[in-house]
Amino acid sequence: MKKEGELTSFYVITSVLALIGFLILLWFVVRVGIPDDAETQACHLSVITRATAPESAQQFVPLHCTTQKLCVKDGRGACTLSFAGERITEVKVESRADDMGNREATRTVEGTLAEEMYSCWKMMGEGKLDLFQSLDQKAGLAPVKSTCVICSRVALDVAKERN
């Protein structure tokens, strides 16, 4: 005879298994972590979503992009003043002397900037997507305005050697 309010073994076992599964999932997320490029993928997905939205709703679809902060340094300094406690990615520029005594960077500042511009261009759809033009602009009723997305901020902390 079942009493009202009695828990059956089915509900107890199901609850315990659900709790164990949740703890295993939580341990896995904490142990493995979130991938480094998750923000980049989220931004690219929001760009694709905005570009494929109907034209009447396109301007209301937000872009979920964050600006990457890069500190290009030569190993001696730090970019703490440039970013004031924000999470940054440090890129070290190593230099070496050539045969004539001139110092040249093995990983140049220009190369770092070029990589950042390329990754931004790729993330924003390689110029193939129309993200910011409204219906008025397409119809020719409003002037076309330039719009920028700031993908990266770069601070340089490279000491120049003087003889």
Image (cartoon, rainbow, N blue to C red):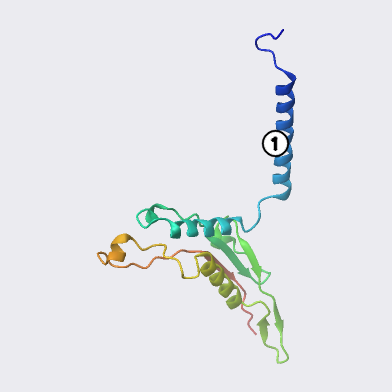
Front-most of 32 and 13?
Answer: 13
Residue at the spot 37% in from the left edge and 68% down from the top edge:
146
- Using the rendered view, name the quadrant where residue 102 is placed: bottom right
Residue 143, compared with residue 45, is above or below; it is below
State the SS at label 1.
helix
49 sits to left or right of 34: left
Residue 160, compared with residue 152, is above or below; it is below
- Using the rendered view, name the quadrant where residue 22 is placed: top right
Front-most of 127 and 37?
Answer: 127
- x then y, percent, for residue 98: 71, 88
Q: Amino acid at mark 1?
A: Phe
* Residue lying at the far front of the rendered structure: 1
Front-most of 71 and 29?
Answer: 29
80 sits to left or right of 60: right
Residue 152, compared with residue 22, is above or below; it is below
Residue at the spot 74% in from the left edge and 39% down from the top edge:
24
Residue at the spot 64% in from the left edge and 68% down from the top edge:
91
- x then y, percent, for residue 59: 38, 56
Residue receiving disc 1: 22
Number of numbered callouts drawn: 1
* Residue lying at the far bottom of the rendered structure: 100
Residue at the spot 51% in from the left edge and 64% down from the top edge:
151
- Using the rendered view, name the quadrant where residue 58 is placed: bottom left
State the quadrant of the N terminus: top right
Front-most of 160 and 6?
Answer: 6
Residue 77 visible, this orientation: no
Residue 10, compared with residue 87, is above or below; it is above
